[in-house]
Amino acid sequence: MKVLIGCEESQVVCAAFRAAGHDGYSCDLVPTRGNPNWHYQNDVLDIIKTQYWDLIILHPDCTKMAVSGNRWYGKGMPRHQERIDAVNWTIDLWSLAKVYSKRAALENPVSVVFPHLENVQYIQPWQFGHGETKKTGLALHNLPNLIPTNIVDGRENRIWKMAPSPTRKRDRSETYPGIADAFVRQWGSL
């Protein structure tokens, strides 16, 4: 399959698809921490249009859309217009992905964008082998819901407890390997 992982610089999901024999590429505005041969450092809106993809998985920036940011971006707050702009950009991205691929998914933590998207499923890392909590939404276009693969004990909220650092935002947004493997195993054979 030709797979595009949009807004991913870590290559966790991209590398999982490539390890399974797929032609996977990540795309982000910043350089990848993975293999640059599999990465488009470019605007995902431009890269989507370069070809028809068998599968597109999108991880748009959640900073302005996550409900955890309501105190900065919520209605009546000074930065609310930034949230509206982020939601509109994400809706446009989602619409474009559905034009250039028969199957698409969009991942974000609990977010104000999901009421604008169809077929939303919520998952947790502890359903895929990681003893942590981070409720995550998946908007799905022509894809089945992910089925938990390895329910484990432990319900630590590691993401919330992360100390401030220059890489905190990046580290908080990285996809858990168990979830990436579930994407590959369950969607890579469709």
Image (cartoon, rainbow, N blue to C red):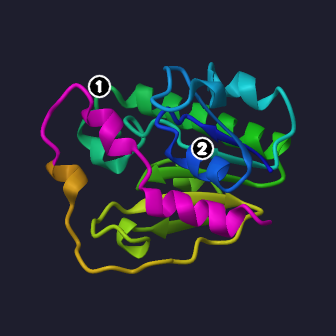
Q: Label 2 crowding class (10 Å Cα cut-off): few <14, some 14-19, many 20+?
A: many
The residue that mark 2 highlights is: 14
Any magenta on residue 187?
yes
Any magenta on residue 45?
no
Looking at the picture, tell me which residue is in the foreground, 113 or 16: 16
Can you tell which mark lies on residue 54?
A: none
Picture coordinates of residue 163, whole percent (x, y):
12, 40
Can you tell which mark lies on residue 78?
A: 1
Amino acid type shown at disc 2: Cys
On-image quarter of the C terminus = bottom right
Element carrying mark 2: helix
- Count how many numbered circles sit on residues in the image: 2
- Residue stretch rendered in magenta on the structure: 162-190
Can residue 119 be seen by looking at this rendering? no
Which image quarter: residue 138?
A: bottom right
Q: Label 1 crowding class (10 Å Cα cut-off): few <14, some 14-19, many 20+?
A: few
Which image quarter: residue 134?
A: bottom left
Picture coordinates of residue 21, whole percent (x, y):
72, 52
Can residue 161 be seen by looking at this rendering? yes
